Amino acid sequence: NAGVTQTPKFQVLKTGQSMTLQCAQDMNHEYMSWYRQDPGMGLRLIHYSVGAGITDQGEVPNGYNVSRSTTEDFPLRLLSAAPSQTSVYFCASSYQYNQPQHFGDGTRLSIL
Amino acid sequence: GENVEQHPSTLSVQEGDSAVIKCTYSDSASNYFPWYKQELGKRPQLIIDIRSNVGEKKDQRIAVTLNKTAKHFSLHITETQPEDSAVYFCAASTGGGNKLTFGTGTQLKVEL
């Protein structure tokens, strides 16, 4: 079991560029989430999914899109990168509601 | 939405002493409260969790207490060791999406 795998680990973008952060899990978890972590602000929920084909917004969804076509994958798309999106992005998954969430290693994203 | 406040933001203790971190939440419907430990540059890792039908849970040197009436929960670490030094986050989950709202973290430093 690889757990939750995020790619890439590091990325530098220019303002206005778009990109997709990849997240895959091999634990057959139904629930998947994306968080961003900024200094002094903890982790904030961007989008989440309760199963294939079902997604919903979290606390800070603006500027991001998600889709969930399979149970395993939950990519996060930045539509037009802005410096305010410089952050560390974590993907997490859990088997069910109110079960422990397992985090990936994160993607460190810098937008110039 | 849910709001989680965490105190203190930094905590320094001597090795062998106890450490206590406190969190309050705003949504009385929250029913799942995990605690995560995050070492520098690493992913958050679950250390203990508690559900709203339980008042206290213990795992070796770590314990969590929950007071639903007052809407606060606390992490207790006894016999602290240098490897306990890390940032600790509390979180609360409300609703069916396993949506976690995190506190802003406590930097724990265990000094020799």
Image (cartoon, helix red, strand yellow):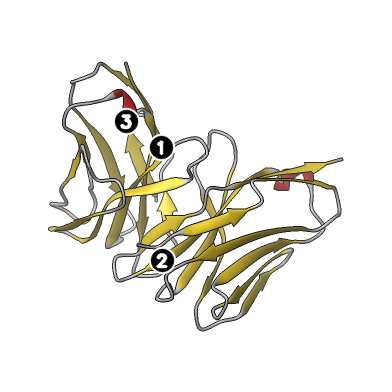
Residue type at numbered disc 2: Ser
| Letter of the chain that mark 2 sits on in the rendering | B
Question: Who comes first in sequence, dot 1 or dot 3?
Answer: 3
Q: Which residue is drawn at the image coordinates 50% and 79% (left, top)?
A: B52
Question: At 87% across and 40% down in the image, what residue appears?
Answer: B112
Determine whether, in the image, residue B25 is placed left or right of residue B88.
left
Query: In the rendered image, which residue does mark 2 sit on?
Result: B93
Circle 1 crowding by C-alpha within 10 Å: few under 14, some 14–19, many from 20: many
Indicate the amino acid at tag 3: Gln
- Considering the numbered disc 2 on the image, is that residue within a helix, a strand or a loop? strand
* Residue A79, horizontal then vertical, whole percent: 16, 32
Q: Which chain does the residue under circle 1 lie in?
A: A
Secondary structure of the residue carrying tag 3 is helix
Q: Name the residue under label 3.
A: A85
On the image, the x and y values in percent for residue B95 come to 32, 70
Tags 1 and 2 on a common chain: no
Task: Evaluate whether label 3 is on the same chain as label 2.
Answer: no
Quadrant of the rendering where the C terminus of chain A is positioned: top left
The residues tagged by marks 1 and 2 sit, at their Cα atoms, a distance apart of: 21 Å
Q: Position of residue B1 (x, y in %)?
A: 35, 62
Q: Are marks 1 and 3 in contact (CB under 8 Å)?
A: no
Q: Is mark 1 on a helix, strand or loop?
A: loop
Q: Which residue is drawn at 15% across and 48% down?
A: A67
Q: Nearer the viewer, mark 1 or mark 3?
A: 3
> Is A13 drawn above or below residue A39 in the view shown?
above
Residue A106 is labelled as 1
Residue located farthest toward the bottom when viewing the structure as drawn: B53
Q: How far apart are marks 3 and 2 (CA)?
A: 25 Å
Amino acid type of the residue that numbered disc 1 sits on in the rendered structure: Gly
Q: Contact, CB < 8 Å: mark 1 with mark 2?
A: no
Mark 3 chain: A
